[in-house]
Amino acid sequence: MASTPIEQYAFLSDGQTGALVSEAGSIDWLCFPRFDSEALFTALLGTEEHGRWLMAPRDGTLLSRTYRGDTFILDSEWETPTGKVTITEFMPINVGEMTSSDLVRTATCTEGTVEIVHDLRFRFNYGASVPWVERAELHGQPCLTAIAGPTAIHLVGPLPDPKGYSHGGTFTLGEGEAESWHMLWSPSYEPAPQLDSIDMLETVTEANWSSWASRIDAEGPYADEIVRSLLILRSLTDTKTGGIVAAATTSLPEEFGGSRNWDYRYTWLRDSSLTIEALVAHGFTDGARAWRDWLLRAIAGDSHSLRIMYGLGGERHLPEFELDHLPGYENSAPVRIGNGAAGQFQGDVVGEVMIALDKLRKAGVADDHRSWALQKELLIFAEENLDRKEHGIWEMRGDLHYFTHSRVMIWAAFDRAIKAVEDHGFDGPVDHWKALRARLADEIEEKGWNREINSYTQTYGSTEVDASLLQLPQVGYLDYNDPRMLSTMAKIEEDLVDDQGFLHRYRTQSGKDGLTGNEYPFLICTFWLVEQWAKTGREAVAKDLMDRLVGVASPLGLLAEEYSPAHGRLAGNYPQAFSHLGLIRAADSFGTKQS
Protein backbone atom coordinates (compact mmCIF):
# COMPACT_ATOMS: atom_id res chain seq x y z
CA MET A 1 0.00 0.00 0.00
CA ALA A 2 1.39 3.40 -1.01
CA SER A 3 2.06 5.83 1.81
CA THR A 4 0.19 9.13 2.10
CA PRO A 5 2.36 11.91 0.59
CA ILE A 6 4.03 13.83 3.39
CA GLU A 7 2.73 17.16 2.15
CA GLN A 8 -0.83 15.95 2.68
CA TYR A 9 -0.32 15.91 6.44
CA ALA A 10 -1.27 18.78 8.73
CA PHE A 11 0.70 19.23 11.94
CA LEU A 12 -0.88 19.81 15.34
CA SER A 13 1.20 20.79 18.35
CA ASP A 14 0.84 21.79 21.98
CA GLY A 15 4.49 22.71 22.45
CA GLN A 16 5.28 19.32 24.00
CA THR A 17 4.43 16.87 21.24
CA GLY A 18 2.71 16.78 17.88
CA ALA A 19 0.32 14.87 15.64
CA LEU A 20 0.13 14.40 11.88
CA VAL A 21 -3.36 14.43 10.34
CA SER A 22 -3.84 13.34 6.73
CA GLU A 23 -6.20 14.98 4.25
CA ALA A 24 -8.36 11.88 4.65
CA GLY A 25 -8.85 12.78 8.32
CA SER A 26 -6.56 10.12 9.77
CA ILE A 27 -4.16 10.84 12.63
CA ASP A 28 -1.29 8.60 11.56
CA TRP A 29 1.39 9.82 13.99
CA LEU A 30 1.13 10.84 17.63
CA CYS A 31 3.53 10.47 20.54
CA PHE A 32 2.37 11.22 24.07
CA PRO A 33 3.40 13.02 26.20
CA ARG A 34 6.64 14.25 24.51
CA PHE A 35 7.92 14.39 20.96
CA ASP A 36 10.37 11.60 21.76
CA SER A 37 7.87 9.38 23.57
CA GLU A 38 6.66 6.09 22.10
CA ALA A 39 4.01 6.59 19.42
CA LEU A 40 0.46 5.39 20.00
CA PHE A 41 -0.52 6.01 16.37
CA THR A 42 2.18 4.81 13.97
CA ALA A 43 0.38 4.23 10.65
CA LEU A 44 2.76 6.82 9.18
CA LEU A 45 5.50 4.19 9.27
CA GLY A 46 3.33 1.20 8.44
CA THR A 47 -0.38 0.59 7.91
CA GLU A 48 -3.58 1.34 9.80
CA GLU A 49 -2.89 -1.83 11.79
CA HIS A 50 0.00 0.02 13.46
CA GLY A 51 -2.41 2.54 14.95
CA ARG A 52 -4.46 5.45 13.68
CA TRP A 53 -7.57 7.51 14.38
CA LEU A 54 -9.64 8.17 11.28
CA MET A 55 -12.48 10.67 11.69
CA ALA A 56 -14.17 11.98 8.55
CA PRO A 57 -17.63 12.45 7.02
CA ARG A 58 -18.98 9.52 5.04
CA ASP A 59 -18.61 10.08 1.28
CA GLY A 60 -17.04 13.43 2.08
CA THR A 61 -15.08 15.71 -0.24
CA LEU A 62 -12.52 17.97 1.41
CA LEU A 63 -13.20 21.53 0.27
CA SER A 64 -10.57 23.40 2.27
CA ARG A 65 -8.20 22.93 5.16
CA THR A 66 -6.56 25.87 6.92
CA TYR A 67 -4.93 26.87 10.15
CA ARG A 68 -7.04 29.38 12.01
CA GLY A 69 -5.00 32.54 11.71
CA ASP A 70 -1.55 32.25 13.26
CA THR A 71 -2.32 29.10 15.24
CA PHE A 72 -2.16 25.33 14.93
CA ILE A 73 -5.93 24.97 15.23
CA LEU A 74 -6.96 23.17 12.06
CA ASP A 75 -10.34 23.85 10.43
CA SER A 76 -11.38 21.50 7.60
CA GLU A 77 -14.46 22.13 5.47
CA TRP A 78 -16.12 19.02 4.00
CA GLU A 79 -19.05 18.47 1.67
CA THR A 80 -21.10 15.28 1.41
CA PRO A 81 -24.08 14.34 -0.79
CA THR A 82 -26.36 15.31 2.11
CA GLY A 83 -24.68 18.27 3.78
CA LYS A 84 -21.58 20.14 4.90
CA VAL A 85 -19.46 19.86 8.03
CA THR A 86 -16.52 21.66 9.63
CA ILE A 87 -14.03 19.53 11.54
CA THR A 88 -11.84 21.40 14.01
CA GLU A 89 -8.76 19.72 15.48
CA PHE A 90 -6.17 21.01 17.91
CA MET A 91 -3.88 20.06 20.76
CA PRO A 92 -4.63 22.27 23.75
CA ILE A 93 -1.78 24.39 25.02
CA ASN A 94 -1.62 23.76 28.73
CA VAL A 95 -1.29 26.78 30.98
CA GLY A 96 -1.68 27.25 34.70
CA GLU A 97 -3.25 24.20 36.30
CA MET A 98 -3.88 22.48 32.95
CA THR A 99 -1.17 19.86 32.57
CA SER A 100 -2.71 17.11 30.43
CA SER A 101 -1.38 15.95 27.08
CA ASP A 102 -4.49 15.82 24.96
CA LEU A 103 -6.11 16.28 21.56
CA VAL A 104 -9.56 17.56 20.60
CA ARG A 105 -11.59 16.87 17.45
CA THR A 106 -14.97 18.57 16.89
CA ALA A 107 -17.43 18.07 14.03
CA THR A 108 -19.99 20.82 13.41
CA CYS A 109 -22.68 20.30 10.78
CA THR A 110 -23.23 23.56 8.89
CA GLU A 111 -25.75 22.39 6.31
CA GLY A 112 -28.12 19.43 5.87
CA THR A 113 -27.09 16.23 7.64
CA VAL A 114 -23.77 14.38 7.76
CA GLU A 115 -22.49 11.08 9.11
CA ILE A 116 -19.15 11.19 10.92
CA VAL A 117 -17.27 7.90 10.63
CA HIS A 118 -14.59 6.77 13.09
CA ASP A 119 -11.96 4.06 12.76
CA LEU A 120 -9.92 4.07 15.97
CA ARG A 121 -7.00 1.67 16.39
CA PHE A 122 -4.96 2.08 19.56
CA ARG A 123 -1.49 0.57 19.14
CA PHE A 124 1.05 1.53 21.77
CA ASN A 125 4.84 1.09 21.66
CA TYR A 126 5.14 2.20 18.01
CA GLY A 127 2.38 -0.12 16.87
CA ALA A 128 3.73 -3.22 18.58
CA SER A 129 1.31 -3.42 21.53
CA VAL A 130 -2.48 -3.77 21.45
CA PRO A 131 -3.68 -2.20 24.70
CA TRP A 132 -6.48 -3.37 26.94
CA VAL A 133 -9.49 -1.16 26.12
CA GLU A 134 -12.61 -0.88 28.24
CA ARG A 135 -15.52 1.46 28.80
CA ALA A 136 -15.11 3.49 31.95
CA GLU A 137 -15.88 6.92 33.36
CA LEU A 138 -13.72 10.01 33.51
CA HIS A 139 -15.00 12.48 36.08
CA GLY A 140 -18.53 11.24 35.57
CA GLN A 141 -18.44 11.13 31.78
CA PRO A 142 -18.39 7.89 29.75
CA CYS A 143 -15.01 7.21 28.16
CA LEU A 144 -12.88 4.58 26.53
CA THR A 145 -9.71 3.84 28.46
CA ALA A 146 -6.81 2.07 26.77
CA ILE A 147 -3.93 0.78 28.91
CA ALA A 148 -0.66 -0.92 28.04
CA GLY A 149 2.24 -0.87 30.47
CA PRO A 150 2.93 2.67 31.71
CA THR A 151 0.55 4.41 29.29
CA ALA A 152 -3.16 5.16 29.51
CA ILE A 153 -5.30 6.95 26.93
CA HIS A 154 -8.81 8.19 27.68
CA LEU A 155 -11.33 9.11 24.98
CA VAL A 156 -14.34 11.19 26.02
CA GLY A 157 -17.23 11.88 23.66
CA PRO A 158 -19.73 9.74 21.74
CA LEU A 159 -18.03 6.38 22.07
CA PRO A 160 -17.24 4.14 19.10
CA ASP A 161 -18.00 0.42 19.40
CA PRO A 162 -15.46 -2.41 19.54
CA LYS A 163 -14.73 -4.21 16.28
CA GLY A 164 -12.11 -6.85 16.93
CA TYR A 165 -8.95 -5.00 17.83
CA SER A 166 -10.31 -1.62 16.72
CA HIS A 167 -13.24 0.66 17.47
CA GLY A 168 -15.62 2.18 14.95
CA GLY A 169 -18.86 4.06 14.74
CA THR A 170 -21.02 6.40 12.71
CA PHE A 171 -22.51 9.51 14.31
CA THR A 172 -25.21 11.54 12.55
CA LEU A 173 -25.35 15.32 12.88
CA GLY A 174 -28.05 17.71 11.71
CA GLU A 175 -27.57 21.33 10.76
CA GLY A 176 -26.29 23.32 13.74
CA GLU A 177 -25.39 20.20 15.73
CA ALA A 178 -21.85 19.43 16.91
CA GLU A 179 -20.02 16.64 18.70
CA SER A 180 -16.56 16.66 20.22
CA TRP A 181 -14.07 13.92 21.03
CA HIS A 182 -11.38 14.62 23.62
CA MET A 183 -8.41 12.25 23.90
CA LEU A 184 -6.19 12.55 26.97
CA TRP A 185 -2.96 10.84 28.02
CA SER A 186 -1.94 9.89 31.54
CA PRO A 187 0.45 7.46 33.22
CA SER A 188 -1.50 4.24 33.79
CA TYR A 189 -0.46 4.18 37.43
CA GLU A 190 -1.67 7.69 38.28
CA PRO A 191 -5.15 9.18 38.70
CA ALA A 192 -6.95 10.11 35.49
CA PRO A 193 -6.31 13.66 34.25
CA GLN A 194 -8.70 16.53 34.81
CA LEU A 195 -11.33 17.16 32.18
CA ASP A 196 -11.57 20.78 31.09
CA SER A 197 -14.15 22.57 28.99
CA ILE A 198 -13.38 22.12 25.29
CA ASP A 199 -14.57 25.66 24.58
CA MET A 200 -12.19 26.99 27.20
CA LEU A 201 -9.31 24.88 25.88
CA GLU A 202 -9.90 26.14 22.35
CA THR A 203 -10.10 29.75 23.48
CA VAL A 204 -6.90 29.51 25.52
CA THR A 205 -5.03 27.71 22.75
CA GLU A 206 -6.07 30.20 20.07
CA ALA A 207 -5.16 33.15 22.29
CA ASN A 208 -1.78 31.66 23.16
CA TRP A 209 -0.67 31.08 19.57
CA SER A 210 -2.12 34.38 18.35
CA SER A 211 -0.51 36.41 21.12
CA TRP A 212 2.90 34.91 20.42
CA ALA A 213 2.61 35.46 16.67
CA SER A 214 1.48 39.08 17.11
CA ARG A 215 4.97 39.96 18.35
CA ILE A 216 6.74 38.66 15.23
CA ASP A 217 8.71 41.32 13.39
CA ALA A 218 8.45 40.22 9.73
CA GLU A 219 8.45 42.22 6.54
CA GLY A 220 9.12 41.88 2.85
CA PRO A 221 7.68 39.65 0.11
CA TYR A 222 7.88 36.51 2.27
CA ALA A 223 6.53 37.90 5.53
CA ASP A 224 3.73 35.31 5.71
CA GLU A 225 6.18 32.46 5.19
CA ILE A 226 8.46 33.87 7.89
CA VAL A 227 5.57 34.03 10.35
CA ARG A 228 4.48 30.43 9.71
CA SER A 229 8.08 29.21 9.87
CA LEU A 230 8.64 30.92 13.22
CA LEU A 231 5.41 29.38 14.48
CA ILE A 232 6.67 25.97 13.39
CA LEU A 233 9.92 26.55 15.26
CA ARG A 234 7.94 27.46 18.33
CA SER A 235 5.70 24.40 17.89
CA LEU A 236 8.82 22.20 17.89
CA THR A 237 10.07 23.76 21.14
CA ASP A 238 9.26 21.98 24.38
CA THR A 239 7.52 24.61 26.50
CA LYS A 240 8.63 22.93 29.71
CA THR A 241 12.33 22.38 29.04
CA GLY A 242 13.15 24.84 26.24
CA GLY A 243 14.62 22.04 24.11
CA ILE A 244 13.96 22.26 20.36
CA VAL A 245 13.41 19.06 18.38
CA ALA A 246 14.85 18.94 14.87
CA ALA A 247 11.59 17.42 13.60
CA ALA A 248 8.43 15.82 14.95
CA THR A 249 9.02 12.40 13.36
CA THR A 250 11.44 9.53 12.99
CA SER A 251 12.52 7.55 9.94
CA LEU A 252 10.78 9.43 7.17
CA PRO A 253 13.26 8.52 4.44
CA GLU A 254 15.78 10.66 2.60
CA GLU A 255 15.18 8.31 -0.34
CA PHE A 256 11.88 6.49 -0.85
CA GLY A 257 12.55 2.80 -0.32
CA GLY A 258 16.04 3.50 1.03
CA SER A 259 17.76 3.03 4.38
CA ARG A 260 18.74 6.64 5.20
CA ASN A 261 16.06 6.90 7.87
CA TRP A 262 16.85 8.72 11.11
CA ASP A 263 15.18 9.77 14.35
CA TYR A 264 15.06 13.57 14.54
CA ARG A 265 13.02 13.99 17.75
CA TYR A 266 15.97 15.33 19.74
CA THR A 267 17.71 18.63 20.37
CA TRP A 268 20.73 19.31 18.19
CA LEU A 269 22.98 22.12 19.41
CA ARG A 270 23.43 23.21 15.79
CA ASP A 271 19.73 23.42 14.95
CA SER A 272 18.97 25.10 18.23
CA SER A 273 21.72 27.66 17.73
CA LEU A 274 20.34 28.55 14.31
CA THR A 275 16.89 28.83 15.90
CA ILE A 276 18.26 31.38 18.36
CA GLU A 277 19.56 33.42 15.42
CA ALA A 278 16.17 33.32 13.71
CA LEU A 279 14.32 34.27 16.89
CA VAL A 280 16.68 37.13 17.66
CA ALA A 281 16.44 38.43 14.08
CA HIS A 282 12.67 38.69 14.47
CA GLY A 283 12.42 40.15 17.95
CA PHE A 284 12.11 37.07 20.17
CA THR A 285 14.85 37.36 22.73
CA ASP A 286 12.73 35.63 25.40
CA GLY A 287 12.56 32.37 23.47
CA ALA A 288 16.25 32.60 22.70
CA ARG A 289 17.02 33.14 26.39
CA ALA A 290 15.00 30.03 27.27
CA TRP A 291 17.15 27.96 24.91
CA ARG A 292 20.34 29.42 26.39
CA ASP A 293 19.12 28.32 29.80
CA TRP A 294 18.40 24.84 28.38
CA LEU A 295 21.98 24.74 27.07
CA LEU A 296 23.40 25.66 30.45
CA ARG A 297 21.50 22.82 32.08
CA ALA A 298 22.20 20.25 29.36
CA ILE A 299 25.97 20.57 29.25
CA ALA A 300 26.61 21.66 32.82
CA GLY A 301 29.49 19.55 34.11
CA ASP A 302 29.78 18.06 30.64
CA SER A 303 31.61 20.67 28.60
CA HIS A 304 34.69 18.49 28.11
CA SER A 305 32.66 15.65 26.60
CA LEU A 306 30.25 17.76 24.62
CA ARG A 307 27.46 15.99 22.74
CA ILE A 308 26.10 17.22 19.43
CA MET A 309 22.54 16.46 20.53
CA TYR A 310 20.58 15.79 23.70
CA GLY A 311 17.13 14.68 24.72
CA LEU A 312 14.48 17.31 25.26
CA GLY A 313 15.28 17.44 28.94
CA GLY A 314 19.04 17.37 28.37
CA GLU A 315 19.42 13.56 28.37
CA ARG A 316 22.78 12.41 27.02
CA HIS A 317 22.18 8.78 26.10
CA LEU A 318 20.08 8.29 22.97
CA PRO A 319 20.88 4.71 21.90
CA GLU A 320 19.84 3.80 18.37
CA PHE A 321 17.85 0.65 17.66
CA GLU A 322 15.54 -0.65 14.93
CA LEU A 323 11.86 -1.60 14.93
CA ASP A 324 11.63 -4.70 12.77
CA HIS A 325 7.83 -4.93 12.99
CA LEU A 326 7.36 -1.71 10.98
CA PRO A 327 7.78 -1.75 7.18
CA GLY A 328 8.59 1.97 7.11
CA TYR A 329 7.24 4.87 5.11
CA GLU A 330 7.09 3.78 1.43
CA ASN A 331 8.71 0.53 2.59
CA SER A 332 11.82 2.41 3.67
CA ALA A 333 13.49 0.22 6.26
CA PRO A 334 14.82 0.19 8.86
CA VAL A 335 12.69 2.30 11.16
CA ARG A 336 15.08 3.70 13.75
CA ILE A 337 14.49 4.95 17.29
CA GLY A 338 17.26 6.91 18.98
CA ASN A 339 20.19 8.31 17.06
CA GLY A 340 23.68 6.85 17.00
CA ALA A 341 25.04 10.16 15.75
CA ALA A 342 24.65 11.45 19.32
CA GLY A 343 28.06 9.97 20.07
CA GLN A 344 29.81 11.56 17.09
CA PHE A 345 32.35 14.35 17.25
CA GLN A 346 31.34 17.20 14.94
CA GLY A 347 33.77 20.07 15.01
CA ASP A 348 31.36 22.81 13.96
CA VAL A 349 29.07 22.63 16.99
CA VAL A 350 30.99 24.94 19.34
CA GLY A 351 31.10 27.55 16.60
CA GLU A 352 27.36 27.33 16.06
CA VAL A 353 26.73 27.88 19.77
CA MET A 354 29.18 30.76 20.09
CA ILE A 355 27.69 32.54 17.05
CA ALA A 356 24.18 32.23 18.46
CA LEU A 357 25.16 33.52 21.88
CA ASP A 358 27.05 36.39 20.27
CA LYS A 359 23.86 37.42 18.45
CA LEU A 360 21.92 37.11 21.69
CA ARG A 361 24.39 39.51 23.34
CA LYS A 362 24.08 41.96 20.47
CA ALA A 363 20.30 41.84 20.88
CA GLY A 364 20.69 43.08 24.44
CA VAL A 365 20.40 39.82 26.40
CA ALA A 366 23.23 40.01 28.89
CA ASP A 367 25.32 36.98 29.77
CA ASP A 368 25.32 36.02 33.40
CA HIS A 369 28.41 34.61 35.12
CA ARG A 370 27.38 31.04 34.33
CA SER A 371 26.79 31.69 30.66
CA TRP A 372 30.17 33.26 29.95
CA ALA A 373 31.97 30.70 32.10
CA LEU A 374 30.32 27.96 30.05
CA GLN A 375 31.39 29.58 26.79
CA LYS A 376 35.01 29.66 27.95
CA GLU A 377 34.73 25.96 28.79
CA LEU A 378 33.41 25.29 25.29
CA LEU A 379 36.44 27.06 23.85
CA ILE A 380 38.70 24.84 25.92
CA PHE A 381 36.86 21.85 24.47
CA ALA A 382 37.38 23.22 20.96
CA GLU A 383 41.09 23.70 21.57
CA GLU A 384 41.51 20.27 23.13
CA ASN A 385 39.97 18.75 20.00
CA LEU A 386 41.56 21.09 17.49
CA ASP A 387 43.56 18.37 15.73
CA ARG A 388 40.82 15.75 15.85
CA LYS A 389 39.21 14.43 12.68
CA GLU A 390 35.43 14.25 12.73
CA HIS A 391 32.12 13.32 11.11
CA GLY A 392 31.06 16.76 9.81
CA ILE A 393 27.81 18.68 9.79
CA TRP A 394 25.96 15.92 7.88
CA GLU A 395 26.79 13.22 10.44
CA MET A 396 28.52 10.92 8.01
CA ARG A 397 29.10 7.36 9.15
CA GLY A 398 32.20 6.69 7.07
CA ASP A 399 35.85 7.56 7.67
CA LEU A 400 36.80 10.61 9.71
CA HIS A 401 38.11 13.75 7.99
CA TYR A 402 38.95 17.39 8.48
CA PHE A 403 35.85 19.09 7.06
CA THR A 404 36.48 22.59 5.78
CA HIS A 405 33.11 23.83 7.01
CA SER A 406 33.84 22.59 10.52
CA ARG A 407 37.29 24.21 10.55
CA VAL A 408 35.68 27.53 9.61
CA MET A 409 33.14 27.12 12.39
CA ILE A 410 35.93 26.54 14.92
CA TRP A 411 37.52 29.71 13.54
CA ALA A 412 34.20 31.44 14.17
CA ALA A 413 34.07 30.17 17.75
CA PHE A 414 37.33 31.91 18.64
CA ASP A 415 36.35 34.95 16.59
CA ARG A 416 33.16 35.43 18.63
CA ALA A 417 35.05 34.93 21.88
CA ILE A 418 37.48 37.67 20.88
CA LYS A 419 34.55 39.98 20.10
CA ALA A 420 33.01 39.21 23.50
CA VAL A 421 36.16 40.46 25.18
CA GLU A 422 36.83 43.44 22.93
CA ASP A 423 33.24 44.62 22.42
CA HIS A 424 31.50 43.56 25.63
CA GLY A 425 34.23 43.65 28.26
CA PHE A 426 34.39 39.96 29.19
CA ASP A 427 37.52 38.32 30.51
CA GLY A 428 39.54 35.73 28.64
CA PRO A 429 42.92 34.93 27.04
CA VAL A 430 42.20 37.06 23.98
CA ASP A 431 45.76 36.97 22.59
CA HIS A 432 45.76 33.19 22.74
CA TRP A 433 42.38 33.04 21.00
CA LYS A 434 43.66 35.40 18.30
CA ALA A 435 46.63 33.11 17.68
CA LEU A 436 44.30 30.10 17.34
CA ARG A 437 42.03 32.04 14.99
CA ALA A 438 44.99 33.01 12.81
CA ARG A 439 46.32 29.46 12.80
CA LEU A 440 42.96 28.13 11.63
CA ALA A 441 42.65 30.76 8.88
CA ASP A 442 46.11 29.89 7.53
CA GLU A 443 45.30 26.18 7.68
CA ILE A 444 41.94 26.58 5.92
CA GLU A 445 43.52 28.53 3.07
CA GLU A 446 46.35 26.02 2.73
CA LYS A 447 44.37 22.78 3.03
CA GLY A 448 40.72 23.64 2.48
CA TRP A 449 41.27 25.57 -0.74
CA ASN A 450 42.01 23.62 -3.92
CA ARG A 451 43.74 25.70 -6.60
CA GLU A 452 43.10 23.11 -9.31
CA ILE A 453 39.32 23.38 -9.04
CA ASN A 454 39.44 26.98 -7.76
CA SER A 455 37.18 26.19 -4.82
CA TYR A 456 37.03 25.40 -1.16
CA THR A 457 36.48 21.69 -0.69
CA GLN A 458 34.37 19.44 1.45
CA THR A 459 37.38 17.99 3.25
CA TYR A 460 41.08 18.75 3.32
CA GLY A 461 42.86 17.28 0.30
CA SER A 462 39.62 16.57 -1.57
CA THR A 463 38.23 17.72 -4.91
CA GLU A 464 34.61 17.36 -3.75
CA VAL A 465 32.48 20.31 -2.72
CA ASP A 466 29.74 20.50 -0.11
CA ALA A 467 26.70 22.74 0.25
CA SER A 468 27.81 23.60 3.78
CA LEU A 469 30.54 25.77 2.23
CA LEU A 470 27.76 28.28 1.50
CA GLN A 471 27.85 29.07 5.22
CA LEU A 472 31.36 30.53 5.06
CA PRO A 473 30.16 34.07 4.34
CA GLN A 474 27.16 33.63 6.64
CA VAL A 475 29.50 33.35 9.64
CA GLY A 476 31.82 36.14 8.51
CA TYR A 477 34.80 34.09 7.40
CA LEU A 478 34.81 35.95 4.08
CA ASP A 479 32.49 38.20 2.12
CA TYR A 480 29.66 36.87 -0.06
CA ASN A 481 31.33 38.63 -3.03
CA ASP A 482 34.84 37.42 -2.29
CA PRO A 483 36.29 35.88 -5.49
CA ARG A 484 37.03 32.66 -3.59
CA MET A 485 33.41 32.41 -2.53
CA LEU A 486 32.09 33.20 -6.00
CA SER A 487 34.22 30.47 -7.58
CA THR A 488 33.23 28.04 -4.83
CA MET A 489 29.60 28.88 -5.49
CA ALA A 490 30.13 28.17 -9.20
CA LYS A 491 31.64 24.78 -8.41
CA ILE A 492 28.76 23.95 -6.07
CA GLU A 493 26.30 24.88 -8.80
CA GLU A 494 28.16 22.71 -11.30
CA ASP A 495 28.39 19.61 -9.09
CA LEU A 496 25.40 19.72 -6.75
CA VAL A 497 22.48 21.57 -8.38
CA ASP A 498 19.99 19.34 -10.21
CA ASP A 499 18.25 20.18 -13.47
CA GLN A 500 15.37 21.83 -11.57
CA GLY A 501 17.60 24.08 -9.51
CA PHE A 502 17.52 22.17 -6.21
CA LEU A 503 20.75 21.63 -4.30
CA HIS A 504 22.14 18.38 -2.91
CA ARG A 505 24.26 18.41 0.25
CA TYR A 506 27.15 16.61 -1.44
CA ARG A 507 27.69 13.89 -4.00
CA THR A 508 26.85 10.62 -2.28
CA GLN A 509 28.81 8.84 -5.01
CA SER A 510 32.00 10.11 -3.36
CA GLY A 511 31.60 7.32 -0.81
CA LYS A 512 32.62 9.45 2.16
CA ASP A 513 29.37 9.10 4.10
CA GLY A 514 29.62 5.33 4.66
CA LEU A 515 25.99 4.74 3.67
CA THR A 516 24.27 2.93 0.84
CA GLY A 517 21.81 4.57 -1.53
CA ASN A 518 21.29 8.19 -2.45
CA GLU A 519 19.23 11.10 -1.21
CA TYR A 520 17.13 13.91 -2.62
CA PRO A 521 18.09 17.61 -2.60
CA PHE A 522 18.13 19.21 0.85
CA LEU A 523 15.88 22.21 1.27
CA ILE A 524 18.06 24.15 3.71
CA CYS A 525 20.97 23.88 1.27
CA THR A 526 18.86 25.27 -1.55
CA PHE A 527 17.76 28.13 0.70
CA TRP A 528 21.45 28.83 1.38
CA LEU A 529 21.97 29.09 -2.37
CA VAL A 530 19.11 31.60 -2.55
CA GLU A 531 20.85 33.66 0.12
CA GLN A 532 24.20 33.53 -1.67
CA TRP A 533 22.63 34.65 -4.95
CA ALA A 534 20.61 37.41 -3.29
CA LYS A 535 23.72 38.75 -1.57
CA THR A 536 25.79 38.79 -4.76
CA GLY A 537 23.60 40.77 -7.11
CA ARG A 538 21.60 37.90 -8.57
CA GLU A 539 18.29 38.92 -7.07
CA ALA A 540 16.17 37.83 -10.01
CA VAL A 541 17.40 34.23 -10.07
CA ALA A 542 17.36 34.17 -6.26
CA LYS A 543 13.73 35.29 -6.25
CA ASP A 544 12.82 32.68 -8.86
CA LEU A 545 14.41 29.88 -6.84
CA MET A 546 12.86 31.18 -3.62
CA ASP A 547 9.43 31.10 -5.20
CA ARG A 548 9.98 27.50 -6.32
CA LEU A 549 11.08 26.54 -2.82
CA VAL A 550 8.08 28.18 -1.18
CA GLY A 551 5.95 26.44 -3.79
CA VAL A 552 7.00 22.94 -2.71
CA ALA A 553 5.78 23.48 0.85
CA SER A 554 2.61 21.71 1.90
CA PRO A 555 -0.69 23.56 1.38
CA LEU A 556 -0.39 24.56 5.04
CA GLY A 557 3.14 25.93 4.62
CA LEU A 558 5.06 23.02 6.14
CA LEU A 559 8.43 21.79 4.87
CA ALA A 560 10.12 18.43 5.24
CA GLU A 561 13.86 17.93 5.11
CA GLU A 562 14.10 17.29 1.38
CA TYR A 563 12.23 17.54 -1.89
CA SER A 564 12.30 15.08 -4.76
CA PRO A 565 11.75 16.89 -8.07
CA ALA A 566 11.45 13.52 -9.82
CA HIS A 567 8.50 12.52 -7.60
CA GLY A 568 7.18 16.03 -6.99
CA ARG A 569 7.05 15.16 -3.29
CA LEU A 570 8.52 16.18 0.04
CA ALA A 571 10.80 13.65 1.71
CA GLY A 572 12.51 13.24 5.07
CA ASN A 573 11.32 14.08 8.56
CA TYR A 574 8.47 16.56 8.92
CA PRO A 575 7.98 19.32 9.74
CA GLN A 576 11.70 20.00 9.71
CA ALA A 577 13.15 22.87 11.73
CA PHE A 578 16.29 23.05 9.57
CA SER A 579 14.27 23.70 6.40
CA HIS A 580 12.21 26.46 8.02
CA LEU A 581 15.38 28.03 9.42
CA GLY A 582 16.75 28.10 5.89
CA LEU A 583 13.54 29.69 4.64
CA ILE A 584 13.76 32.46 7.24
CA ARG A 585 17.41 33.24 6.40
CA ALA A 586 16.71 33.23 2.67
CA ALA A 587 13.65 35.46 3.09
CA ASP A 588 15.67 37.87 5.21
CA SER A 589 18.39 38.04 2.55
CA PHE A 590 15.99 40.07 0.42
CA GLY A 591 15.70 42.59 3.25
CA THR A 592 17.81 43.94 6.08
CA LYS A 593 17.33 41.50 8.98
CA GLN A 594 20.70 39.74 8.88
CA SER A 595 23.74 41.33 10.41
Image (cartoon, rainbow, N blue to C red):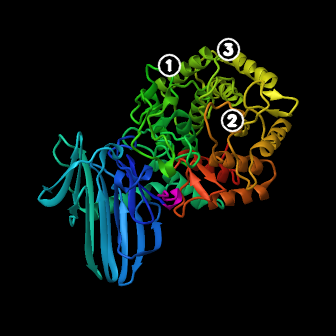
Is residue 234 in sight in this rendering?
A: yes
Is residue 214 in sight in this rendering?
A: no
Residue bearing mark 1? 305
- Lower sequence index among marks 2 and 1: 1
Q: Which amino acid, mark 3?
A: His
For the point 68% across and 59% down, the residue is 548
Q: Secondary structure at mark 1?
A: helix
Per the rendering, the mark at residue 475 is 2
Assess whether residue 594 is covered by the magenta stretch.
Answer: no
- Lower sequence index among marks 3 and 1: 1
Q: Secondary structure at mark 3?
A: helix
Part of the protein shown in magenta? 1-8
Across and down, in percent, residue 346 comes to: 59, 27
Assess whether residue 6 is covered by the magenta stretch.
Answer: yes
Disc nearest the viewer among 3 and 1: 1
Quarter that holds the C terminus? top right
User: Mark 2, residues whose alpha carbon is within 10 Å: few (<14), some, or many (≥20)?
Assistant: many
For the point 77% across and 28% down, the residue is 462
Disc nearest the viewer among 2 and 1: 1
Q: Is residue 108 left or right of residue 392?
A: left
Asked if residue 467 is positioned above or below residue 435 in the image, the reply reads: below
Per the rendering, the mark at residue 335 is none
Give the Cα distance between marks 2 and 1.
25 Å
Per the rendering, the mark at residue 432 is 3
Q: Is residue 134 left or right of residue 436?
A: left
Across and down, in percent, residue 324 comes to: 41, 39
Q: Secondary structure at mark 2?
A: loop
Q: Which amino acid, mark 2?
A: Val
Pick the front one: 569 or 493: 569
User: Mark 3, residues whose alpha carbon is within 10 Å: few (<14), some, or many (≥20)?
Assistant: few
